[in-house]
């Protein structure tokens, strides 16, 4: 499957960023966050108890030391002071956590109510966002500004000359993985060009025209850069690059008339030689309105007069015909 353009992918991911499922996930994340904060407060309280016991033990060891042993007493006093410093720091951190989180049991009711209110707000945003994004009054600059408010960063990985993998990290930690079509500067940079070339070669060798091949490729879902359909000129270029040329029997034939390549082959000159004489006015010929081809009378006299022009016996010949196109 071919990738879509970058702007369409980002817009689609943006519209799916806030959904009822995302609201439920947000509510679960809030519960998990509250439980994590409570666990951190419990861990901080246990740390304070351990440090308090360590400080008390250091104090008892200092009280039991012989005062005459000054070196030991100084070391025990230093350990006691260090334990007291750690204890004060842990008590300060615990007090800050309790002030920020409050009493978990008292805050449980308001937290649940706030989560429910926020969930309803998210659902309201999800309902109003698609019509807001589709509003023609919203300019591209405003859409970009809205996206910048929700996107934290974008990570790109080029996997081919015209393909990139994107990870859009939204504010809040969620992300969307996308595959984008960046277009190529040449046919050789197109992803899947080898498969297109194989199809062109197989169908051309079976006698299909360039127009039929292009139509078949488009029906099968093949596309050029930026999702453009396969053109007839592209098929012709790929066919000629593989050395596949249509045989003379595949050239168009018109009943009662000769086309320019057919006349050139019969006379033994190049088609370019006849083209030059038509442009300079030395050959007058009908240009068919239906087939958009130069048509010559399919008669022996046509070949004879053209051969006289080749030999220089004539300066101008009139090969116009009133063939029905």
Image (cartoon, rainbow, N blue to C red):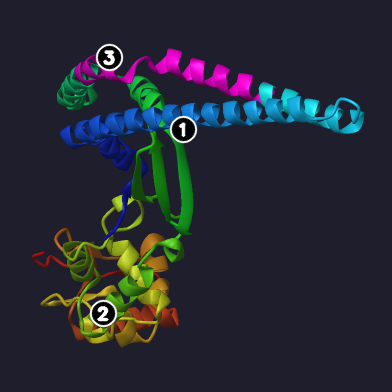
Give the labeled residue for mark 1.
43
Mark 3 neighbour density, 10 Å: few (under 14) some (14–19) many (20 or more): few
Q: Which quadrant holds residue 144?
A: top left
Mark 3–mark 2 Cα distance, whole angstroms, equals 79 Å
Mark 1 neighbour density, 10 Å: few (under 14) some (14–19) many (20 or more): few
Viewport quadrant of the C terminus: bottom left
Viewport quadrant of the N terminus: bottom left
- Please say whether residue 92 is one of the residues in the magenta stretch: yes
Mark 1–mark 3 Cα distance, whole angstroms, equals 20 Å
**Callout in the foreground (3, 2):** 3
Q: Which quadrant holds residue 118?
A: top left
The answer to whether residue 251 is above or below residue 11 is below
Give the labeled residue for mark 2.
204
Say what secondary structure mark 3 lies in: helix
Q: Position of residue 292 (x, y in %)?
A: 21, 61
What kind of secondary structure does the magenta stretch mostly adopt?
Answer: helix
Q: Nearer the viewer, residue 21 or 126?
A: 21
Tell me the tag on residue 106. Answer: 3
Tell me the tag on residue 102. Answer: none
Residue 136 visible here:
no
Q: Position of residue 296 (x, y in %)?
A: 22, 73
Say what secondary structure mark 1 lies in: helix
Q: Nearer the viewer, residue 304 or 162?
A: 162
Q: Earlier in the sequence, mark 1 or mark 3?
A: 1
Mark 2–mark 1 Cα distance, whole angstroms, equals 76 Å
Q: Residue at x 62, y 23 (%)?
A: 87
Magenta range is: 85-113
The answer to whether residue 114 is above or below residue 261 is above
Mark 2 neighbour density, 10 Å: few (under 14) some (14–19) many (20 or more): many
Q: Position of residue 239 (x, y in %)?
A: 34, 75
């Amino acid at each position: 499957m071919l990738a879509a353009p970058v702007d369409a992918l980002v817009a689609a991911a943006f519209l799916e960023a806030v959904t009822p499922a995302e609201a439920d996930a947000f509510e679960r994340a809030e519960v998990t966050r509250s439980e994590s904060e409570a666990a951190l407060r419990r861990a901080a309280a246990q740390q304070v108890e351990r440090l308090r016991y360590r400080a008390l033990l250091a104090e008892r060891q200092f009280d039991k030391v012989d005062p005459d042993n000054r070196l030991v007493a100084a070391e025990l006093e230093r350990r006691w002071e260090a334990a007291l410093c750690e204890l004060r720091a842990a008590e300060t951190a615990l007090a800050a956590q309790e002030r920020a989180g409050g009493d978990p049991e008292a805050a449980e009711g308001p937290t649940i109510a706030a989560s429910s209110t926020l969930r309803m707000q998210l659902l309201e945003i999800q309902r109003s966002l698609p019509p807001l994004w589709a509003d023609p009054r919203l300019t591209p600059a405003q859409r970009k500004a809205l996206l910048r408010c929700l996107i934290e960063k974008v990570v790109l990985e080029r996997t081919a000359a015209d393909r990139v993998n994107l990870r859009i990290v939204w504010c809040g930690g969620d992300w969307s993985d996308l595959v984008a079509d960046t277009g190529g500067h040449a046919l050789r940079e197109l992803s899947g060009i080898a498969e297109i070339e194989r199809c062109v070669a197989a169908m051309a060798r079976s006698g299909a025209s360039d127009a039929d091949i292009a139509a078949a490729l488009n029906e099968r879902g093949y596309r050029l850069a930026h999702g453009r359909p396969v053109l007839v000129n592209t098929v012709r270029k790929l066919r000629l690059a593989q050395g596949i040329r249509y045989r003379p029997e595949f050239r168009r034939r018109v009943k009662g008339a000769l086309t320019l390549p057919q006349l050139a082959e019969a006379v033994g000159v190049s088609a370019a030689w006849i083209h030059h004489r038509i442009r300079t006015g030395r050959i007058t010929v009908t240009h068919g309105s239906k087939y958009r081809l130069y048509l010559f009378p399919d008669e022996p006299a046509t070949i004879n007069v053209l051969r006289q022009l080749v030999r220089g016996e004539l300066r101008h010949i009139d090969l116009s015909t009133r063939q029905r196109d």
